[in-house]
Image (cartoon, rainbow, N blue to C red):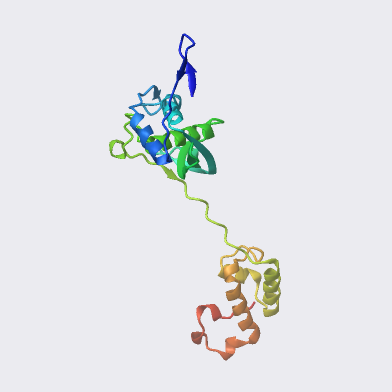
Amino acid sequence: MTTTKQDDTPMQVVLPDHTSIYAAIAASAREVRVIGKSERNKFDGYDFASIDKFLMLVNPICGRNGLFPIIAQREVEFYDNVNSKGGKSVWARFFFDVTLYHSTGQTLGPVNMMVAVPMNGAQTSGSAQSYALKQFFRSTLMIPTGDKDDADLNATETHRSTPPAAAKPQTVTPDQYIKLRDTAEAAGVPAEKICAAYEAPSFEQFPADAYNSAMSRLQLTLDGLKTATPAADLDGDSIPYEGK
């Protein structure tokens, strides 16, 4: 690599020639220093190193040692968060795959990263990506930032997702609905009586997992097993309906 001095005299710059990506990472780790905090989060009251200042340190080090990252968003999921005061807000979990490449063609990763951030506009995905990249290099190159983000130093803050809505129970198919309706009519048992027994609003919304039980009881009624078999000998799913 050739560059120039202020007097335009060519100056040769020799870059390290690492034979492996691991040697390049080790060399990069030796070059890092503590990154000063240049920004302050006025909402939560703490100082932090901005992504720009972070990259101003990391980029030249990676460039000298033939390292560069590729970050790809793999997935995102949204959820309602409830804070310690009961307030609700929409958050998102961004899942990234970060692969570190070396000039030899060797790679490290992909390393999976997850960042949870509040949904606050068009910058949400960008801020999540920046933070994922910062944390990747911070851990890979063991970069000290002076941040007091050790879990033992921080008070526990309530952060939970509201439970997902319960899945709607599966209902009978159209063919099952017709068969259930026709069998009930043939047995002389009102639809309301059957639905009440299974806490179903109607035959159309009759739970699929109760279909076989209801049909068995209707069939017993049709077969006249009420008088042929004492009720004490029947299990709960075999008690026939009494009809109208």
- Residue 226 drawn above or below residue 197: below
> Between residues 217 and 35, which one lies in front from this camera angle?
35
Q: Is residue 194 above or below residue 22?
A: below
Relative to the observer, which residue lies in front, 73 or 1? 1
Which residue occupies 36% across, 37% down?
26
Task: Please identify the residue farthest to the left as the structure is shown.
Answer: 152
Q: Is residue 242 visible?
A: no
Which residue lies at the image location 47% right of the left edge and 42% below the top edge? 106
Determine which quarter of the picture holds residue 207: bottom right
Residue 46 image position (x, y, % from top left): 35, 27
Q: Tell which of 210 and 120 is nearer to you.
A: 120
Residue 124 appearing in the image = yes
Percent coordinates x, y for residue 194 in the rendering: 61, 71
* Residue 87 percent across, percent down from the top left: 44, 37
Front-most of 34 and 193? Answer: 34
Q: Is residue 126 left or right of residue 182?
A: left
Image position of 206 (left or right of 14): right
Where is the C terminus found, in terms of image quarters? bottom right
Q: Is residue 239 above or below residue 81?
A: below
Residue for point 39% across, 26% down: 49
The number of numbered discs placed on residues in the rendered structure image is 0
Asked if residue 13 is positioned above or below residue 163 in the image, the reply reads: above
Q: Residue furthest top?
A: 7
Q: Position of residue 223 (x, y in %)?
A: 64, 86
